[in-house]
């Protein structure tokens, strides 16, 4: 039986060129994960992306999650990672002289929301006076946006709301559900949000991970999803890697991979100029 000749798609041809050229290395890349969820959830979510990087490089890639946001930033400052997954406000926080440069960003649109349990009385942010708001890490994008929104409502840089910090938004929501806080901050897919309703007596709700409903008191404008940044010591591969990321959306196999990455909408090019709007959120660092 004769075999049909094997056909190589353009993405695979480029990958092979990348593998057989200067990117073929025997050193291990460190892939840093910003701690926006528990380490277990982060490793489970991004193991397929790590495996793809290793497949493209034909060399090992190791995942690492920091215990909190500040330790993650410290590791970026000490250039521990070859590649890292960061929120958009981290990119300008690294500084213009940083050896890290944005490679691609996901096409996801996210939003910060402030929620309360359905069986409680707050109907708007002003009702949170003298209550506790559970938040992710203080330097996370969701918390920064939430503090801005609460401060604007009370017209104060020190509003009468207690901010109770947790490592990530899942823990913050869990604290609210356990009665440790009256409200919580989380970041979700902006496309999953219904548009604001004009009548205050029609509360907007969202289903939490356990299936329970929560009332939405406020939400931010949409903002970009995660960004992949690459250290200059491996930026010789930046054009090839960017092309491979962008081509994933072009094939059925690539689309399947994107779903395993948790970013089914794919990726788009990223440059430092795209992140200037977030610079002020981290000026105090």
Image: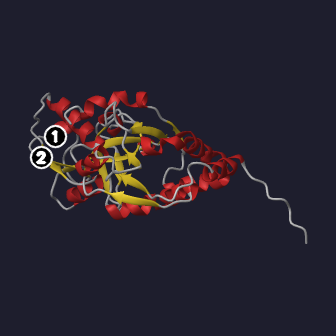
Q: Position of residue 234 (x, y in %)?
A: 47, 45
Q: Position of residue 129 (x, y in %)?
A: 11, 40
**Quarter location, residue 179:** bottom left
Residue 127 marker? 1
Q: Position of residue 134 (x, y in %)?
A: 19, 50
Residue 170 is at least partly visible in this image: yes
Image: 162 above or below 30: above
Image: 28 above or below 72: below
- In the picture, the quarter occupied by the C terminus is top left
Marks 2 and 1 sit apart, C-alpha to C-alpha, by: 9 Å
What residue occupies the far bottom of the structure in this picture? 1
Image: 1 above or below 232: below
Q: Find numbered disc 1 in the image and state the secondary structure of the residue it sits on.
A: helix
Residue 249 marker? none
Residue 231 is at least partly visible in this image: no
Q: How is the image coloured?
A: secondary structure
State which mark lies toward you, 2 or 1: 2
Label pair 2/1, CB-CB below 8 angstroms: yes
Q: Position of residue 103 (x, y in %)?
A: 48, 40
Residue at numbered disc 2: 131
Task: Say left or right for 183 vs 24.
Answer: left
**Quarter location, residue 229:** top left
Name which residue lies at 50% across and 50% down.
263
Name which residue lies at 33% across and 61% down.
39
């Amino acid at each position: 039986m004769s075999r049909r000749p094997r056909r190589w798609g353009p993405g695979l041809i480029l990958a092979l060129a990348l593998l057989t050229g200067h990117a073929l290395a025997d050193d291990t890349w460190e892939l840093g994960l910003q701690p926006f969820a528990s380490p277990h959830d982060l490793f489970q979510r991004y193991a397929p992306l790590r495996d793809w990087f290793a497949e493209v490089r034909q060399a090992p890639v190791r995942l690492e999650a920091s215990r909190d946001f500040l330790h993650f930033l410290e590791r970026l400052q000490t250039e521990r990672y070859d590649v890292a997954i960061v929120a958009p406000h981290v990119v300008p926080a690294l500084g213009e002289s940083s050896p890290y440069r944005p490679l691609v960003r996901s096409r996801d649109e996210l939003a910060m929301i402030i929620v309360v349990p359905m069986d409680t009385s707050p109907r708007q942010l002003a009702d949170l006076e003298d209550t506790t708001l559970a938040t992710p890490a203080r330097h996370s994008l969701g918390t920064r946006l939430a503090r801005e929104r609460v401060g604007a409502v009370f017209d104060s840089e020190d509003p009468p709301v207690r901010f109770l910090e947790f490592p990530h938004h899942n823990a913050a929501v869990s604290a609210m559900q356990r009665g440790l806080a009256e409200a919580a901050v989380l970041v979700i897919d902006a496309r999953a949000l219904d548009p604001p309703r004009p009548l205050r007596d029609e509360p907007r709700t969202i289903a939490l991970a356990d299936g329970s409903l929560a009332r939405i008191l406020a939400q931010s404008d949409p903002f970009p999803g995660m960004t992949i940044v690459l250290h200059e010591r491996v930026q010789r591969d930046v054009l090839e890697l960017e092309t491979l990321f962008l081509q994933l959306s072009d094939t059925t196999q690539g689309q399947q991979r994107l779903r395993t990455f948790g970013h089914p909408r794919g990726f788009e090019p990223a440059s430092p100029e795209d992140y200037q709007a977030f610079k002020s959120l981290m000026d105090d660092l």
